[in-house]
Image: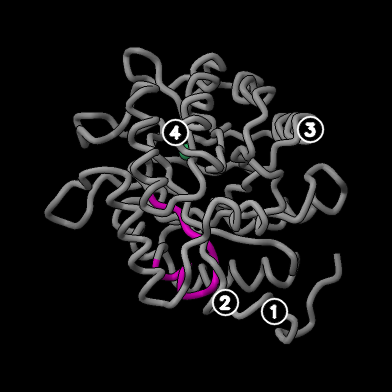
Amino acid sequence: MTPKTDDTDTVSDPATRPCILCVAITGSVPTKADNPAVPVTVSEQIESTQEAFEAGAAIAHCHVRADDGTPTSDPERFARLKEGLERHCPGMIIQFSTGGRSGAGAARGGMLPLRPDMASLAVGSNNFPTRVYENPPDLVDWLAAEMIAHDVKPEIEAFDLSHIFQAVKMAGDGRIRGPLYVQFVMGVRNAMPVDRAVFDFYVATLRRLAPDAEWCGAGIGAGQILLNEWSIAAGGHTRTGLEDNVRLDRKSLAPSNGALVRRAAQLCEKYGRPVASPAQARAILGLRPA
Ligand SMILES: [Zn+2]
């Protein structure tokens, strides 16, 4: 990988590149008490994703819940969800979470043999609102190796600047198959806040270290709409959905994941970015066809 020395070889005009919208439908934290639209059962998840898909989401970022609503990494539930999404959202990119709120150790990767198109991969540790988000090096390496073994493209979750450097290092020594797809996550309490100068530095740093990488911005809570707008304006991709934010604005709850996707799609229109179809998103990310 050759570091860039100037900006003249920047990927095609950011102003007209298709923008990939990812919908994070459920997560492991929000409950129906926070917003009744949060899909919890597999059938609710499929229905909610289908509306988001029709609104323009090309990637579904998925967690699953147990019957009592608590997070789980149960591969059987992931399998049922994947089957339903393939049927009702043809071509949509399915991304499973290997995040640490849903299990511990190797249980976090137990669904990777199902061969989703993508899976999230945190490459370092940081604080979360009430605890340490533990991603020890041996677990990160194991999850990354499982993703290579099952042809799953990782989405690197960058909660901190050091995570960008670590991802580049792992791509360089073959632990991650490139080109990288990095998501900048801002606004998690006790981790990196929503900060414009840091966002710009993230974008510039990734471009410098990994010119062939694609990136996505995700903001938590009220930061969601900000990260959507910053990312779309800067030529990146962006994530929305009830996992990160249950409100449409200060006064009202979001009626659905689809409503949040429509809001992001309107921002794409404002900046003249076409919303990427699933097929375009697969080509941009170097994924196998559906
Ligand atoms: Zn997630």
Q: Residues within 10 Å of mark 3 (few under 14, many from 20)?
A: some
Q: Is residue 86 above or below residue 172?
A: above
Q: Is residue 282 rendered to the left or right of residue 272?
A: right
Q: Is residue 235 magenta?
A: yes
The quadrant the C terminus occupies is: top right
| 227, 113: nearer the viewer | 113
Q: Is residue 145 above or below residue 19?
A: above
Where residue 14 is drawn, which disc sits there? 2
Residue hosting label 3: 145
Distance from the alpha carbon under mark 2 to that under mark 4: 31 Å
Distance from the alpha carbon under mark 3 to that under mark 4: 30 Å
Q: Amino acid at mark 2?
A: Pro
Q: Residues within 10 Å of mark 2 (few under 14, many from 20)?
A: some
Labels 3 & 2 near each other (Cβ < 8 A)? no
Residue at the spot 60% in from the left edge and 58% down from the top edge:
280
Where residue 88 is drawn, which disc sits there? 4
Secondary-structure class at tag 3: helix
Residue hosting label 1: 10
| Mark before the other along the chain sequence, 3 or 4 | 4
Query: In front: mark 1 or mark 4?
Result: 4
| Mark before the other along the chain sequence, 1 or 3 | 1
Secondary-structure class at tag 1: loop
Q: Amino acid at mark 3?
A: Ala
Residue at the spot 49% in from the left edge and 30% down from the top edge:
87
Q: Is residue 24 magenta?
A: no
Secondary-structure class at tag 2: loop
